[in-house]
Amino acid sequence: MARSIYITSAEGHTGKSTIGLGVLDALMRVSSRVGVFRPITRSAVERDAVLELLLAQDGVQLDYDDCVGVTYDDVRADPDRALSTIVERFKAVEGQCDAVVVIGSDYTDVASPAELGYNARVAANLGAPVLLVLSGRDQQNQAEQLGTTTARTPEQIVQIAALAVSELAAERAELFAVIVNRADPDALVEIVDSIRTATPVWAIPEDRALVAPSMRDVLHAVDGHLVRGAEELLEREAYSVVIAGMSMVNVLPRLTERAVVVIPADRSEVLIATLLAAASGTFPPLAGIVLNGPFELPEPVLRLIDGVEVTIPIVATDLGTYDTAVRIMGTRGRITAESSQRHRSALALFQTHVDITELTIEMGLARSKVVTPLMFEYDLIGRARADRKHIVLPEGGDDRILRAAGILLAREVAELTILGEEGDIRARADSLGVDISAARVVSPTDSDLVARFAEEYAGLRAHKGVTLQQAADTVTDVSYFGTMMVHLGLADGMVSGAAHTTAHTIRPSFEIIKTKPGVDVVSSVFFMALADRVLVYGDCAVIPDPTSTQLADIAISSAATARQFGIEPRVAMLSYSTGESGSGADVEKVREATALVRERMPDLPVEGPIQYDAAADAAVAKAKLPDSAVAGRATVFVFPDLNTGNNTYKAVQRSAGAVAIGPVLQGLNKPINDLSRGALVDDIVNTVAITAIQAQGQQ
């Protein structure tokens, strides 16, 4: 039977979608079959946004229609019959899953005071313990401005918790835990200590960016359209509204950070002044501009705007000033499947303030022996966060690096230094809506560091005739600068390559970091995350045609990397023949390498030469090598050359739908890792986490 959890609240606008995302994310770390269910929705026609958000998460394999119970109309018409339908439909989902996240009703304008009681009744009949979500904000009788409200005191929250818990008890619902969401950041400990239950209690602080509407939300609210500006910046949050119905000199002092500026469409001079302020860097960064009124911008004004780089979103609406302001003020932020930045921020907030391990243990979920790609990636983040290391990112001019940095900092995966000119880097991050305030930004032309690095590099390369002046020129290159930071202990590791070649990224490490004692070569592995397990492939990226000695090095390094990341190494030295069945120079190279591995690491399970099918398939292994401890069970696959390895990992990636994580460099004294120039933001996040874990192993 699946382990289920019922997420409900005592009022509306508590942020259940954030909690639902976090719980779903936590459960997917330990289970490969997690489902979601929505017992009550607003409409049978309009799709439920929260349910769609959860179903869009990687790893949830259910259809929308199967995950819906009944509507509010069904409940009002016949509560008992509706409950029966909910239970029936839930059981169908439960039968397909190891765990199910159930999201209670939303307290809409058709809700009744008995709504919590009915949710409790549903939870009791589903056999799902309740995760009670309380709001840390006072949402009654407030003149809200873009989702901003007053913080509740711990005493107020305790009173609400007591009433809600008693109502759950009246319906025989089991309380699993309490989460106070949107809590006062300065009172988290006091809030948790004040709520005395026999169950876990967590508090998550208010994050203004999660409750504030995005410019896309504003655009929809005013029935507007994008006139100019970057489409991607519509995801930027709006924190306040400035009504620019006055002269230019009076508007400018009233501009505030992340404000949406409402300008009458016939006030071109105010529009131009606001655009200049947004681009100047001397005024607070704005969220966007809304032009209101049924007026077209004059052609000379449009020509002027088109002549400069305008990225700030400019939205036009036919509404009057009052209606425009009212609609914007009443707009709330939402996490949707499309709002990737907000989605990542919500997960980071949950992971930082909720004990994921305690949550899954309380649910009675043991860690599955199956390891899915998602589970492996989640484990990387968790392990990196457990002992944070300092990673340098040399390519601060790449938007992917900045977006990844925002995620890494929000999730507290690592401390970061980003290379680049500080003003440019921070301005670009702000324009992308990315918070990198916790990162250190260092210029690769910083005179003090360049002098220090040049002296060190000149000493290291003196045998090559490198002068101090030549060294000073060399170390201003971002790859050399970042590598010198690692070498001198100013950072624990480096990740680069999103905008540079592999050679450009790793050449400095050969010259400066060098290899570990007993290791002759730097090589690489890919973690190949299949549907139910993770394998290690090496070397698929660095050494074109390794000798038998180098092949043995690769095998030993790959086994060590596998063990460091929780994979028990059983090494297959691959060839086109198995055992003693073949001959030839290529087979002999693998045979010699296998003998060297056994000599150097007698306790390491290794088999070679062996064909891939005999290494991976138990049935083939039984026929070809029935007495082998590796055949049919290999976890580390060592390829005889780069041609074979690179093609094989790509074939498995594309044909079997595996997630390839890497390349991960191994053999260096300190961790340096290379990115593909086509790397996605998630690839960068994973590589930084891997680098941080490697740095943990340097202690």
Image (cartoon, rainbow, N blue to C red):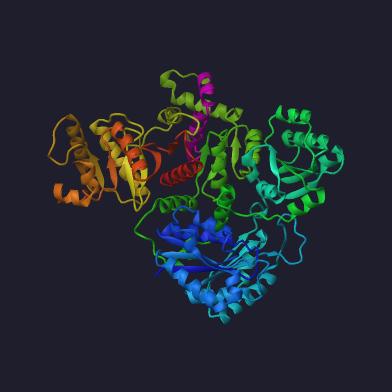
Q: Which residues are magenta?
A: 469-495
Residue 472 magenta: yes
Q: Position of residue 344 (x, y in %)?
A: 55, 50
Q: Position of residue 66 (x, y in %)?
A: 47, 63
Question: What residue lies at 53% left-to-right and 77% top-to-bottom?
Answer: 81
Question: What residue lies at 73% left-to-right and 67% top-to-bottom?
Answer: 140
Question: What residue lies at 60% left-to-right and 70% top-to-bottom?
Answer: 73
- Viewer-proximal residue among 304 and 416: 304
Give the residue at the far bottom of this rendering. 170
Q: Is residue 636 above or below residue 518?
A: below
- Viewer-proximal residue among 137 and 478: 137
- Whether residue 363 is visible here, answered yes or no, is no
Q: Is residue 273 above or below residue 34?
A: above
Magenta stretch: dominant SS? helix
Residue 260 magenta: no
Q: Quadrant of residue 419?
A: top right
Q: Quadrant of the N terminus?
A: bottom left
Q: Quadrant of residue 418?
A: top right
